[in-house]
Image: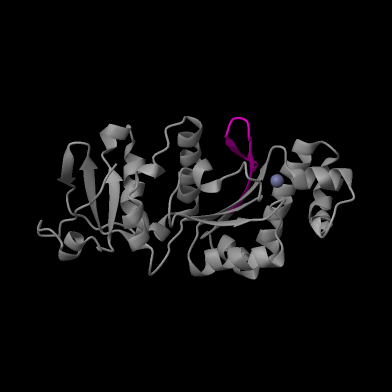
């Protein structure tokens, strides 16, 4: 939709870097009216990727937003980060996603040197749970770990510690989903080839707690893995205690595309 984005300096003149297309402190955002976006969405777009000046692009051309200093993405509160994820899911379920309207070339330029994802998601590897699509997000916005059964193994915990402790993610969403094969296989305790059964011990506590109902066990598993993250990681528990991070369990309905929070 857009092939370029221009950014003024504080004195209103065009930035030299913007002219070369390598400005590292701008955000290409669609005209809010064209997309029916609300003001909170606009504010968020202007805050992304460490931006300091926002340019608004309309279908008719380019118009400059008033130059302003903007907050870094990682200054979002945990509640605001969670809200942004859920608002993205609402756009996804209402079939009005906006993430595809970002200029990917500009986003790639912005994120060569650093990343500032505002949220992390631990989800299943299932092909029906495409995280960026489900939350209507794009490059550099969410730090995603995926593993069958969305289980908090030590490697997954290490990855999420990096996301929260180093990159500054403000929320970790642990998300189970409808029709999860890993939970189903654990319930059935099926003989499976190779190392697939290595998943079972991680999911078994949820089956013991919730019984053989697939949805109930999947939701219990998301809650248990979220609790494990909060308790077994000193990095994560420290940030949670300091109110700098939230760890929340959620469930994804693969039929409707809706994410519901479990706590
Ligand atoms: Zn699954």
- Residue 14 counted in the magenta span: no
Region of the chain picked out in magenta, as a range: 247-263
Above-or-below relation of 92 to 2: above
Residue drawn 26% across the image and 33% down it: 33
Q: Quadrant of the C terminus?
A: top right
Q: Residue at x 43, y 57 (%)?
A: 140
Q: Residue 10: in sight, yes or no?
A: yes
In the displayed structure image, the side of residue 18 where residue 129 appears, left or right: right
Horizontal and vertical percent position of residue 135: 50, 43
Q: Is residue 72 visible?
A: no
Colouring method of the image: one colour
Q: How many marks?
A: 0
Residue in the image at 43% along x and 62% along y: 116
In the displayed structure, 207 sits above or below 105; it is above
- What x and y, as percent, mark residue 70? 28, 56
**Residue that extends furthest to the front in the rendered view of this protein:** 193
Quadrant in which residue 152 is drawn:
bottom right
Q: Could you tell me residue 39's position as x and y percent?
A: 32, 39
Residue 65 horizontal/vertical position (percent) = 19, 47
Q: Quadrant of the N terminus?
A: top left
Q: Residue at x 62, y 41 (%)?
A: 128
Query: Residue 124 vs residue 92: left or right?
Result: right
Magenta residue check for 261 = yes
| Nearest to the observer: residue 18 or residue 39 | 18
């Amino acid at each position: 939709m857009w092939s370029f984005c221009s950014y003024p300096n504080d004195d209103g003149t065009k930035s030299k870097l913007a002219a070369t297309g390598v400005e590292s402190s701008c955000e290409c955002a669609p005209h809010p009216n064209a997309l029916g976006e609300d003001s909170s969405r606009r504010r968020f777009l202007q805050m992304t990727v460490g931006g300091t000046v926002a340019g608004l692009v309309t279908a008719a051309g380019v118009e400059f937003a008033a130059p302003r200093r903007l907050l870094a993405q990682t200054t979002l509160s945990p509640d605001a980060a969670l809200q942004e994820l859920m608002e993205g899911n609402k756009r996804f379920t209402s079939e009005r996603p906006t993430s595809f309207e970002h200029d990917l070339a500009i986003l790639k330029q912005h994120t060569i040197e650093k990343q500032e994802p505002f949220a992390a998601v631990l989800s299943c590897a299932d092909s029906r749970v495409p995280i960026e699509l489900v939350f209507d997000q794009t490059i550099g916005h969410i730090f995603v770990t995926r593993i069958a059964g969305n289980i908090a193994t030590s490697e997954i915990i290490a990855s999420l510690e990096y996301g929260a402790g180093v990159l500054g993610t403000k929320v970790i969403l642990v998300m189970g989903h409808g029709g999860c094969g890993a939970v189903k296989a654990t319930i059935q305790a099926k003989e499976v080839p190779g190392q697939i059964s290595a998943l079972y011990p991680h999911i078994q506590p949820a089956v013991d707690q919730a019984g053989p109902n697939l949805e109930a066990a999947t939701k219990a598993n998301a809650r248990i893995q979220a609790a494990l993250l909060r308790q077994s990681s000193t990095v994560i528990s420290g940030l949670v205690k300091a109110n700098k991070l939230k760890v929340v369990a959620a469930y994804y309905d693969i039929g409707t595309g809706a994410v519901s929070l479990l706590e």
